[in-house]
Amino acid sequence: MAQFPEHFRWGAGTYSYQVEGAANEDGRGESIWDRFCSIPGTILNNDTGLVACDHYHRYPEDIRIMQELGIHLYNFSIAWPRIVPTGRGKVNPRGFDFYDRLVDGLLEAGIEPYATLYHWDLPQALQDELGGWQSRETAYAFAEYVDIVSRHFKGRIHNWLTLNEPAVTAFEGHEDGIHAPGIKDARIAWQTSHHFLLAHGLAVPILRANGDEQTRVGITLNFTQIDPATQSPEDQAAARFLDGKLHRWFLDPLFRGEYPADVLSQLGELAPKTEPGDLEIIARPLDFLGANYYTRSLVTHSPTGSLSDFGSVRAEGSEYTEMDWEVHPRGIYTMLVRLHREYHVPQVYIVENGAAFADTVSEDGRVDDPRRIHYLREHLLQVHAAIAEGVPLAGYSVWSLMDNFEWSLGYSKRFGITYIDYPTQKRILKASGYWYRDVIAANGLS
Ligand code: IFM
């Protein structure tokens, strides 16, 4: 039996644009994802987040599912365009109503709200007026929004995560252009990465000042196990650079107050402009780090020598999910041990871990997803091993509570432990949901 520590916290997550829907209700402003999705051909099947899982209206049922699971915490994000529709200035009081009901409902159900302040739905007005995250001013606009939100929820939300996966939104949104706002410019992408970190650092003291003695502040980063496809010096160098770009570029400033020198020197002209004092702002002490882990990447070097078009190969004999992501459970252990030994993170939460599979509803109305159970089980065993190694891991949250809008892949990928029948919005707890419920009840797995 892999028994977890006594106060280990189990959770499940969703994020605003992926589940809420109600995109035009109660004064919500347009976000960059609304705009991006409205461009035909951008998103698979031209799906959008207009309705999504209708969590905005169906949250009471979703809270009941959380209660059935027995989770201790719910990871969700607050949509900036609901609260400040144009990003800066006028606050929309009706924008708080949904989150008030959600947070109060969670608290009544004994589930702790873990609120992420930014998961990719920037108010479109800031993109139009400032160029979005390529402008330093957006970081200051974020700080104002954080001030408004954290004052409002004082005493009700104690656990704050400033940003989720800044590396993904910086590079996939501004270098690859496959996420909103669809920019393809490496220089802009690196500049936005700095502004994300700056925005985070500006938010930290605001959250503390507006909170109370229970307030805890963190940020969530995404991690992939990055290995070279071969032992050739070129592939090894590519893997080292990618690890630098996706991991150390964010970890080093947050926990060491500096950008990694090897990445900086390779960037040359692409290096972001910074101002004196920025790194001190970014490196403000945190209470915990949120860490997301899904897969491994076997990297090949770029044939053109570019810093963006690396290749990858498939791992012989490995299982792959519907995302075409390798199932590589050991990577979550390696990541956790690294965060502990190299970065001395005060505390870690797994904020996301999970897998997309092609789930279907059987004739008797059940959703059997043995591959997801296997995936979660193998990862949890590695998480357990990391705790035994001394990693200060406080909790684990599965991605996701329910199937939802998977960005440029629309609704085609199902990550949930709850199945969503989109035409009827019916929720069906999958076999993995029942399995997770039992893990939580036992605080461990055999
Ligand atoms: O759905 C996403 C989520 O929004 C951010 N982390 C990865 C998940 C799966 O791709």
Image (spheres, grey):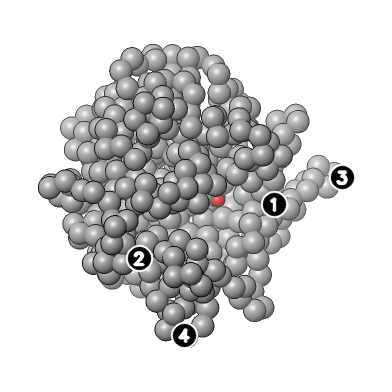
Camera-side mark, 2 or 4 = 4
Residue 127, percent across and down?
41, 31
Q: Earlier in the sequence, mark 4 or mark 1?
A: 4
Residue 178, percent across and down?
54, 47
Report the number of numbered marks: 4
Q: CA distance from mark 4 to mark 1?
A: 44 Å
Residue wearing tag 2: 244
Q: CA distance from mark 2 to mark 4?
A: 18 Å
Checking the image for residue 232, the label placed there is: 4
Q: Earlier in the sequence, mark 1 or mark 2?
A: 2
Asked whether disc 2 touches disc 4, contact meaning CB atoms under 8 Å apart, the reply is no
Q: CA distance from mark 3 to mark 1?
A: 15 Å
Q: Secondary structure at mark 4?
A: loop
Mark 1, Cα crowd under 10 Å, few <14 / some 14-19 / many 20+, is: some
Give the residue at x 69% y 52%.
431
Label 2 near ligand 1 (CB < 8 Å): no
Q: Secondary structure at mark 3?
A: loop
Give the residue at x 67% y 39%.
41
Q: Earlier in the sequence, mark 3 or mark 1?
A: 3
Residue wearing tag 3: 363
Checking the image for residue 431, the label placed there is: 1
Which amino acid type is shown beneath numbered disc 1?
A: Ala
Residue 439, percent across and down?
55, 56
Q: Earlier in the sequence, mark 2 or mark 3?
A: 2
Q: CA distance from mark 2 to mark 3?
A: 48 Å
- Residue 142, by quadrant, is top left
Judge whether residue 34 can be spotted in this image.
yes
